[in-house]
Image (tube, rainbow, N blue to C red):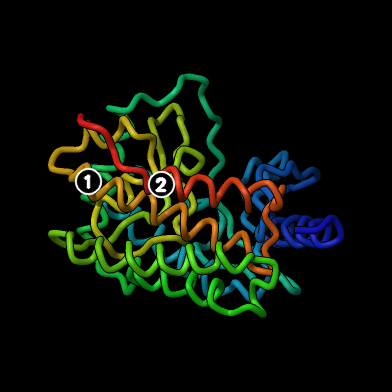
Amino acid sequence: MEPWELGRAVDAAQATAAELGLRADDAVTIHNSDRVVLRLLPCDVLVRVAPSEHLADSRFEVEVARRLADVDAPLAELEPRAEPRVYVHGAFAVSLWRYYEPVGAEISPADYADALVRHHAALRRIDLDAPHFTDRVAGALREVNDTERSPELPDADREFLSGTLSGLSAAISAGSSGDQLLHGEPHPGNLLNTRRGPLFVDLATCCRGPVEFDLAHAPEDVGMHYAGADPALIHRCRALGWAIFSAWRWRQEDQMPDRAHWRTEGLRRVRTALEPRGPG
C-alpha cells in the first residue's frame, strides 16, 4: 500500500480493535503489499487489512482457518477474543489473528516437510469449495495476454510467459496422480517457527491441485522428506510458480515493493527453473 493508504489501513485496524474492547495504542507493520499485516499493541493481536475489493478473499481465508481449527492443522489461529469473521471498516476488510512470537532457529527440511504432511492431512478432512491451481494460471494468463493490463511487458517476454504458463499448466495436470486441497503458497515467509512448532499463515491462497504444487513453494530439500512426492513434478510446478509470480509483477496495478527489480528477477527465475535438471 502507498503511505497514504497505509495510514488509513492502520486507522481501520486500530478502530476495529477498539470497537472489540482491545487496546491498540500502537501498530507495527509486519508486511505491506496489496494488503498490510500489522501487530497491534498492547493487545498483541495480528491484523490483516485489505482494501474492500478483496473482501471475498479475506472472508475465504477466515473460513479456511475456521474449518482447519477443528482438525488440528498446524496453522496460526484466529484471535479468540474476537468473533471469527471479517470486519468491514470504511474501505477496508479487517481480520484478527493470534500473534506468535517467532523463535530464532531455522526450520529444518524434515520439520518443514512434516508440517506440510500434517497440513495436507488436515486439508483432506474438510469440505471446502476452493479454486483449482489452473484457475490461478488462467488469472495470470489474463494479465499477460492483455496489453492494457500489462502495457510495459516486452513482446518477447509476453510470448515467453504466455507459452510457459499454458504449457506447464497442461503438463502438470496431465502428470498429476490426483488433486487435493492445498495451502497454495507455503513458502518460507508463510511458515512461522514458533514455540508451538511450525505454523502456516496466509490461507487465502488455498486451492486444489497436486501436493507437488505446494512443495514447489518450499526450499528444494523439503521435497526429499515428503514421502511419495514426484521430484520431476515438483520441478515443473516450481517453474510454473515463478511464471505466475512474474506475470503478476508486470500487471499495471501491482503494488509489490521493489517491483522493478522483481519484474526482471522473476523472468530470470522462470528461465532458471525451466533448465533441465542434472542426474540426482
Q: Which residue is mark 1?
A: 232
First along the sequence among labels 2 and 1: 2
Query: Foreground mark, 2 or 1?
Result: 1
Q: Residue furthest front?
A: 156
Question: From the viewer's perspective, is residue 267 above or below residue 170?
Answer: above
Q: Is residue 150 left or right of residue 158?
A: right
Q: Is residue 117 left or right of residue 66?
A: left
**Does residue 202 show up?**
yes
Tell me if mark 2 has few (under 14), some (14-19) or many (20+) residues whose alpha carbon lies within 10 angstroms of its own.
many
Which quarter of the figure is the N terminus placed in? bottom right
**Which SS class for mark 2?**
loop
Measured as percent of width and height from the top left, residue 186 is found at 41, 46
Measured as percent of width and height from the top left, residue 85 is found at 52, 66
Towards the viewer: 16 or 101? 101
Q: Residue furthest top?
A: 105
Which quarter of the figure is the C terminus placed in? top left
Question: From the viewer's perspective, is residue 266 above or below residue 221?
Answer: below
**Which SS class for mark 1?**
helix
**Does residue 73 show up?**
no
Towards the viewer: 117 or 234? 234
Q: Amino acid at mark 1?
A: Ala
Question: From the viewer's perspective, is residue 46 above or below residue 226?
Answer: below
Measured as percent of width and height from the top left, residue 211 is found at 25, 52
Q: Residue at x 20, y 59 (%)?
A: 125
Q: Residue at x 30, y 70 (%)?
A: 128
Q: Which residue is mark 2?
A: 186
The numbered dot on residue 162 is none
Q: Residue at x 63, y 65 (%)?
A: 154
Q: Residue at x 22, y 61 (%)?
A: 180
Q: Quadrant of residue 221?
A: top left
Q: Amino acid at mark 2?
A: Pro
Q: What distance separates the C-alpha of mark 2 from that of mark 1?
A: 19 Å
